[in-house]
Amino acid sequence: MDTKAAIFALMTVWGVGTCAAVPAMAQETEPAAEEAEAHKDNPLLNRVWVRQDGSDTLPGVMHIFLADGTMVSDSCWETYRLSNWQQLTDTEIAWDEDGMTINADIALLTSDELVLSLKLVGGVEEQRFAPASVPYLCPDMQK
């Protein structure tokens, strides 16, 4: 038996490439209308926010606050992180980072700008963000 025939036989046994109908088990669920409307009016949610402040910070830091309570953090120099986050009030958010809760005040939030005042152990740190432009490409890193 040649190699191609052996691979084809294995794929057939494993079921790869077959078109047998499998019953769908997933159920589509729609969020409540008022919940969907609340998310629609919140400019913080479901956007890619890229950090803008300071030339002393590494480039490409970004956060995405998803409506389901997941926060995606990424940068051009570090791997991504998924964290739980919540909006405590209209002007305060919190997320979990390495087992610690990070609290931040929303100092400014518009469709074009996000300013967070992070309450860190060493004091308050202000971070400025803007929506990512598409396409976005990380800048070259100096080595």
Image: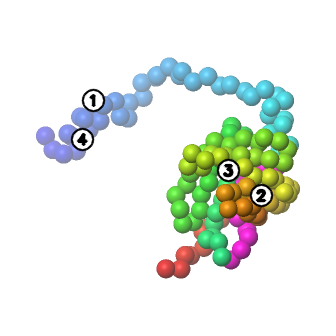
Q: Residue at x 20, y 39 (%)?
A: 6
Q: Residue at x 78, y 41 (%)?
A: 88
Q: What residue span does the magenta drawing correspond to?
A: 43-55
Q: Give SS at disc 4.
A: helix
Mark 1: amino acid = Val
Mark 4: amino acid = Ile
Q: Is residue 72 above or below residue 114?
A: above
> Considering only order in the chain, which callout, 4 or 2, is on the residue closer to the N terminus?
4
Circle 3 packing at 10 Å, graded few (<14), some (14-19), many (20+), is some
The reply to whether residue 70 is in sight is no
Residue, disc 2: 116
Examine the image and state in which quarter residue 16 appears.
top left
In the displayed orientation, state which residue is furthest to the front. 122
Q: Main secondary structure of the magenta part?
A: loop
> Considering only order in the chain, which callout, 3 or 4, is on the residue closer to the N terminus?
4
Q: Give SS at disc 2.
A: strand
Assess whether mark 3 and mark 1 are in contact (beta carbons under 8 angstroms). Answer: no
x, y percent for residue 68 = 68, 37
